[in-house]
Image (tube, helix red, strand yellow):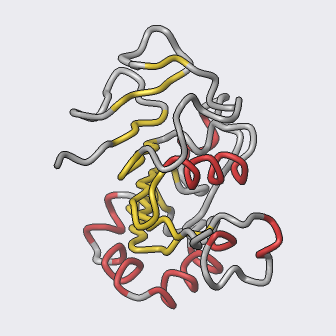
Amino acid sequence: MTPRILDVGCGINKFAGAIGIDNNPRTKADVLCDLDHFPYPFRDNSFDQLRAIHVIEHVADVIRTMEEFHRLVRNGGTVLMETPHYTDFSSFCDPTHRWHLNSFSFRYFGQDDAGFGYYSQARFRERKVRVKLLALWRYLGFELLVNAFPRFRRFWEYYLCYVVRGKVITFEFEVLKTPE
């Protein structure tokens, strides 16, 4: 069976085989909707996978948007997101960017919610986080260290990321839902 995929904010590069939603009529969206207006026009658990590539930094409410992603994807399904790292030039040069995120920005939705589990009941398991660094640092092997060792990634984001700047962060989450 072919997985049902929702491409949120699909733009002109809609993922092949996905249902695309966007608020811009000049895109390849199958469904036009305001991404800041909830709920999106789909039933609960309608999708096996949701893609939001360079979308989360544009929404008005990150927490509510993540809750909507959680609602739309079945238990065990996948949410893929990509966003500029907050130290990248592109994070600040686009006037439509509302949020400047790092690789730990979504920890509140994890099982270890950093003590802030009251923000949302939506839960995700972090399967993968990958940080892409600027080319010089990638060629010097720094990107490999940042991605291979979560403690080093934390050290990098706390102390070094303004010198060794990030470029893009890719997240892969598994949707966790409790039986009702």
Give coordinates of residue 20: x percent, y percent: 39, 28
**What is the quadrant of residue 57 in the picture?**
top right
Give coordinates of residue 69: x percent, y percent: 55, 49
In percent of the image, x 66 and y 35: which residue is there? Answer: 39
Give coordinates of residue 61: x percent, y percent: 74, 44
Residue sitting farthest toward the top: 26
Q: Is residue 104 above or below residue 145?
A: above
Q: Is residue 21 above or below residue 128?
A: above
Give coordinates of residue 67: x percent, y percent: 65, 53
Residue sitting farthest toward the front: 180
Q: Kindly tell me whether residue 109 is visible in this rendering.
A: yes
In the rendered structure, the answer to whether residue 154 lies left or right of residue 26 reads right
The answer to which of 140 and 98 lies nearer the viewer is 98
In the rendered structure, the answer to whether residue 136 lies left or right of residue 59 reads left
In percent of the image, x 31 and y 67: which residue is there? Answer: 138
User: Split into 4 quadrants, where in the image is the C terminus?
Assistant: bottom right
The answer to which of 147 and 110 lies nearer the viewer is 110
Residue sitting farthest toward the right: 118
The answer to which of 120 and 81 lies nearer the viewer is 120
Q: Is residue 34 above or below residue 153?
A: above
Q: Kindly tell me whether residue 83 is visible in this rendering.
A: no
In percent of the image, x 64 and y 23: which residue is there? Answer: 34
In percent of the image, x 57 and y 83: which residue is there? Answer: 154
